Amino acid sequence: MPHIKVVGLGGSLKPGSASVLALKEALRGAEEAGAHIELFELHALDLPMFVPDRAPPESVQRFVDSVSTAAAMIWSSPVYHGSMSGAFKNALDWLELLSKHSPPYLTDKVIGLIATAGGVQGLQAINAMEFAVRSLRGYTHPLTAPLDRAWQLFDQSGQFSDEATLVRLRTLGKGVAEAAKKMAVLG
Ligand SMILES: Cc1cc2nc3c(=O)[nH]c(=O)nc-3n(C[C@H](O)[C@H](O)[C@H](O)COP(=O)(O)O)c2cc1C
């Protein structure tokens, strides 16, 4: 099987972000499946707002370069007002820097999707992210993880206490890595 890289992107800008914790679990699943993983937390990336044609700062260039050499990504956003967060969408907008790459954008990359919601609108953010995957020419992995009422899934120390969710996230990460490996063999 080919050696592949899976890049994780996500989280909100607050410490102890549920969507980052969920993303880390999914990346663990990808790693267990043999993938090399790299995590980009939005609060650490501290991306400026995307401005067309503006030279990207070093943090953006490092992120975009890493994405361009990945076989797959896992995205994890909190649900903000029925969709992905603005900060998450801004990170995706910076992928416009891949428009002139060959192949462009996220062509042939597999994308796993996670959303953490306070209520029951996780699937809305997943659907919004799926539109973005398609416009960036990637493939959404069929196992998605809309985590509704995410606050119920954690214990008081801020760790996941829900075993079924842990299994779901690791299975998602493993599925993304294995699908990317199959795509790499076919390509
Ligand atoms: C500005 C804002 C808007 C939100 N909008 C929604 C929403 O529309 N639907 C929902 O289910 N939860 C909503 N939430 C709750 C978050 O989705 C939820 O707390 C999520 O787990 C936060 O993830 P994080 O810990 O990674 O920031 C909102 C939270 C904030 C701060």
Image (cartoon, helix red, strand yellow):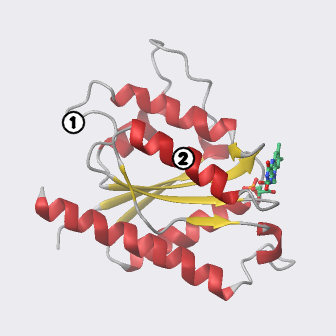
- Identify the secondary structure beneath mark 2: helix
Q: Please give the residue where the numbered disc 1 appears in the rendered image.
A: 103
Q: Is residue 39 left or right of residue 45?
A: left
Label 2 and label 1: CA atoms lie apart by: 21 Å
| Mark 1: secondary structure | loop
Residue 141 or residue 1, whichever sits in front: 141
Occupied quadrant, residue 17 = bottom right
Q: Quadrant of the N terminus?
A: bottom left
Q: Nearer the viewer, mark 2 or mark 1?
A: 2
Q: Amino acid at mark 1?
A: Pro
Q: Residue furthest top?
A: 53
The amino acid pointed to by label 2 is Met
Residue, x 34% and y 68% (percent of image)?
A: 177
Where residue 38 sits in the image (x, y, percent)?
Answer: 44, 57
Q: Residue at x 43, y 65 (%)?
A: 142
Where residue 161 appears, as percent x and y from the top left, is: 74, 83
Left or right relative to 11: residue 3 = left
Instruction: Give the image location of residue 88, x and y in percent.
Output: 61, 41
